[in-house]
Structures are given as C-alpha cells and as structure tokens.
C-alpha cells in the first residue's frame, strides 16, 4: 500500500436512527401514566408542607409559597409516636422474614418432591388468594380471642404471614422450577448434601424472587389498618402507625395537615425499602433464574 494513499473516513457501525412515532407515543403515554401515579404522592407531601390557611382554602393551588413544618411537628410531638413506629417496623420485618423463609421451603417442597394431593394443595393456594380479607376478619377475631392474642402484636403478625404465604409460594414455585435438576444432581455427585444445596446453591438463585415477594408482604403489612383496628382494642401501646393517624381525625374538624404529614412519614420506610431492593426486585419480577 502506498504511503500516499488516501484513507477513507471510518463510518460509525451503529448510526443513530430516528425514533419511530410509535415509540415516541409509547414513551409519552408512559410519562403520563407515571405523572398520574406520582401526583397523589406529590399532593400528599405538598399538603403536609402547606400552612393551615392554604389547606383549608376553597381555591387549592398545586404549589405553596410559604412551606411550613408545623404539621410534621405535630406528628412527631404526638404521644408514643416512636413506639407506634417501632411496632409497625417489628410487625413488618417479622412478617417479611418469616413468610420468605416458609415460602422458600414450601415452594421447594411442592416443586422438587412428588407426593399425593400436591396439585390440590397448589389449587388451594390460588383459592386462598381469591377470598377477600374482610370476609375473614370476624372469624380471625374469634380465633385470636380464643388463642389469647388480642391486643398483642402477634394478632397482626400471624394473619399477615398466613395471607402472604399463598402468593409467595406460588411465585417462588416458578423460580425453583427454573433451576435445572441437573444442577442438584451435579452437586450431589460433588458431595454436597441436600441441605447444603438448598441454602448455598438454590437459595441464592431464587433470592430475587424472595425479594419480589417480600416487597408485597412489606407493603400490605406496613399499611394495614383493618387488622390493627379489629384486633388491637384496648391496649394502645401495641398500636401501629395507621392507628396513630386516627388522632388527627376529630369530630368537629379534621387536621388534614397532620394526616398528610403522618402519611408522608409512613411512606418514607416503604421508599427506603424499595431503594434498597430495587435491583433485586427488577430481576425478580422479570424472572432472573434461567435454564
């Protein structure tokens, strides 16, 4: 090749293509849906920061020029607010850990083992999800009364574990089934016991599914009001955060600033939990385990 040969300019391998109108429309619709979903959260935080005069105004505005922290001050100055927060955190964490452990073992059992009535058991899990919670509140009340669990955190933990298990087991069953049985056979050939395969190989592979189910368990438990109102009757020291909001509902006039500030405080732990598990949550919902 001659030294004086002219070199042609390199062309980009992947030239930029104009976006298609269909994709632009889909992105626009996605932004609109996201804005519609986020607007109630924005209005909640805005109402918590508004002074009392703007909250009670007949012409509400989607902004405030004089934000105030008085509503948050009333929330944190409420008696035993810290205890209510710890009660909610204790119940939610206990339900998440217990339901995840039981669901993992149960999903492994119904997937890896062959036994009678296995299909019937799986169908019962689906049927249990179809029963509304309100229909079982009164029977659960008498059950907790006979067990001596009323006015205790156990009356909230046990029902939430029971309601979280059907969905968690059914979802984790797909993750356990996606792990090839040849992997377990290879582990046994290498000398690994069944318990070692269960906790050191299978558990890390289905962990994204555990995170996904734990998110739903945490949200339903953290925001529970029905069970707390039904089972915590006289002992207010066992109340949770949703029950604490009742203080701001008054017969003559509701304290909407306090209600919105308390709701904002309740939302913060859920957002923190989402931030901590967001990567595992995405892979869990998308099915991270593949053959």
Image (cartoon, rainbow, N blue to C red):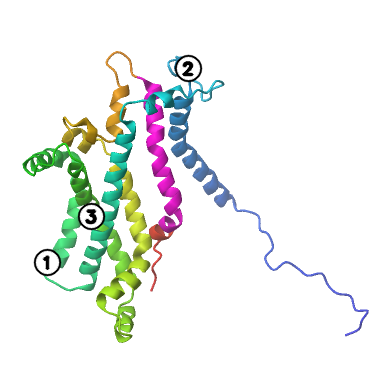
Q: Residue furthest left?
A: 146
Rounded to the nearest whole Å, what is the CA distance between mark 3 and mark 1? 18 Å
- Tell me where the magenta segment starts and ends, as one range: 255-282
Q: Quadrant of the N terminus?
A: bottom right
**Disc with the residue nearer the chain's start (3 vs 1):** 1
Question: Element type at marker 2?
Answer: helix
Whether residue 273 is situated above or below residue 123 in the rendered picture: above
Whether residue 206 is situated above or below residue 190 in the rendered picture: above
Q: Name which residue lies at 29% across and 59% down.
A: 171
Q: Magenta-highlighted stretch: main secondary structure?
A: helix
Task: Classify mark 3: residues with Cα within 10 Å, few (<14), some (14-19) or many (20+).
Answer: many
Question: Element type at marker 1?
Answer: loop
Query: Disc 1 marks which residue?
Result: 117
**Number of marks drawn:** 3
Q: Position of residue 241 (x, y in %)?
A: 31, 34
Q: Position of residue 134 (x, y in %)?
A: 18, 38
Q: Name which residue lies at 20% across and 67% down.
A: 110
Whether residue 5 is situated above or below residue 272 in the rendered picture: below
Query: Disc 2 marks which residue?
Result: 54
Rounded to the nearest whole Å, what is the CA distance between mark 2 and mark 1? 62 Å
> Which of 234 and 124 lies nearest the eye of the viewer?
234
Q: Name which residue lies at 56% across and 21% down.
A: 65
Q: Is residue 25 magenta?
A: no
* Camera-nearest label, 2 or 1: 2
**Disc with the residue nearer the chain's start (3 vs 2):** 2
Query: Disc 3 marks which residue?
Result: 165
Task: Classify mark 1: residues with Cα within 10 Å, few (<14), some (14-19) or many (20+).
Answer: few
């Amino acid at each position: 090749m001659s030294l004086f040969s002219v070199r042609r300019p390199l062309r980009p391998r992947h030239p930029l293509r104009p976006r298609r109108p269909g994709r632009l429309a889909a992105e626009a619709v996605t932004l609109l849906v996201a804005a519609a979903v986020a607007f109630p959260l924005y209005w909640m935080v805005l109402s918590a920061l508004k002074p009392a005069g703007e909250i009670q105004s007949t012409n509400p505005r989607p902004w405030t020029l004089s934000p105030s922290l008085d509503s948050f001050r009333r929330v944190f100055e409420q008696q035993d607010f810290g205890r209510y927060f710890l009660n909610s955190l204790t119940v939610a964490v206990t339900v998440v850990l217990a339901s995840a452990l039981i669901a993992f073992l149960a999903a492994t059992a119904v997937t890896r083992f062959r036994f009678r009535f296995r299909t019937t058991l799986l169908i019962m899990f689906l049927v249990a999800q179809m029963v509304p919670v309100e229909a079982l509140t009164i029977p659960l009340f008498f059950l907790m009364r006979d067990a001596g669990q009323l006015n205790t955190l156990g009356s909230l933990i046990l029902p939430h574990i029971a309601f979280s298990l059907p969905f968690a087991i059914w979802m984790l069953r797909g993750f356990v089934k996606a792990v090839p049985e040849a992997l377990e056979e290879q582990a046994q050939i290498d000398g690994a016991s069944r318990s070692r395969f269960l906790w050191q190989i299978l558990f890390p592979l289905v962990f994204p599914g555990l995170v996904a189910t734990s998110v739903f368990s945490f949200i339903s438990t953290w925001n529970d009001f029905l069970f707390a109102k039904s089972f915590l009757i006289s002992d207010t020291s066992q109340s949770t955060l949703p029950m604490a909001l009742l203080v701001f509902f008054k017969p003559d006039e509701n304290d909407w600033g306090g209600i919105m500030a308390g709701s904002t405080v309740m939302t913060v732990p859920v957002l923190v939990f989402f931030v901590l598990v967001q990567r595992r949550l995405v892979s869990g919902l998308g099915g991270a385990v593949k053959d």
